[in-house]
Amino acid sequence: MAVLSAVMDKIDARLTFVKHRVLGANNERLDFVMDSFYKMEPRQKNFVLAGIVAAIVCFIAFAVFFYIAQIGALETRLNDSFAALNTLQEQKADFGRANGKFNVIVKDVTRRTQGLKMKPLLEKFARSLSIKIEGLSEASAAFSSDNPMGKFLEQRKIEVRLPRVSIPKLLKFLVKVERERKFLRISDLTIRGIYGTKLYFDASAVINWYRRA
């Protein structure tokens, strides 16, 4: 209670200070204004009253205008908020669908590449076509920083060289690789001619594949 009383006393003191500054210690400024007004001629009084009325009307008009402007701004902010909320809900739904498809892809890749050994697989393809393969150097191939696959899958690449191979057998080998249904993809294919023959070539290719990280 003592604290509340102290606060009320401070407020009362501030109000008294403002009253004294505006009206004077004993309302002498108000008395002076009223006395001056009564001493005016009727025409001057009318001018003063008209000015006061005009000031009041201007103040009310400004207050109404300010109120309407604030209401309009509030409505605009509300409309923008609802539009942003609707957009967010649509994007959330789109993200849910895209994330579901992404999870299906990750599971499918994991299932198909589980236990995959690339060197034995490629050697089997080569034997079936009676061609020779060399190299088979395997390494990691990093995903780009903005690719979400990098959190779930590891990208691998293996370089294979096929010396003295005919074009038909080379094409059959590459088709076998990509038709294996293990998400194998050919890149960086190079074919070089061999001096003295037009039937055989030295070829090399990089095969990209994925496995669970």
Image (cartoon, grey):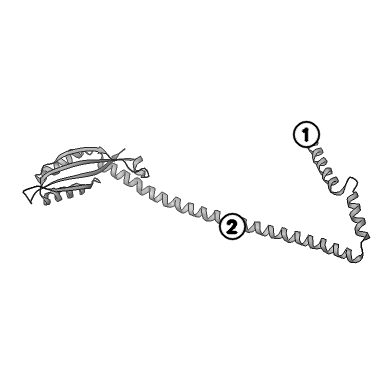
Label 1 vs 2, first from the N-terminus:
1
Q: Is mark 1 on a helix, strand or loop?
A: helix
* Outermost residue toward the left in this view: 196
Image side of residue 158 versus residue 86, left or right: left
* Outermost residue toward the bottom in this view: 43
Can you say which quadrant of the picture contains the C terminus? top left
Q: Which residue is drawn at 63% across and 59% down?
A: 72
Residue 127 position in % (x across, y down)? 11, 42
Image side of residue 144 versus residue 21, left or right: left
Give the vertical position of 46 relative to 96 (above or below): below
Residue type at the position of mark 2: Thr
Q: Which residue is drawn at 59% across and 57% down?
A: 76
Spatial CA distance of label 1 from label 2 is: 44 Å
Image side of residue 163 versus residue 211, left or right: left
Can you say which quadrant of the picture contains the N terminus? top right
Q: Name the residue under label 1.
A: 3
In this orientation, which residue lies closer to the viewer: 204 or 149? 204
Residue type at the position of mark 1: Val
In this orientation, which residue lies closer to the viewer: 62 or 176? 62
Query: Which label belongs to residue 76?
Result: 2
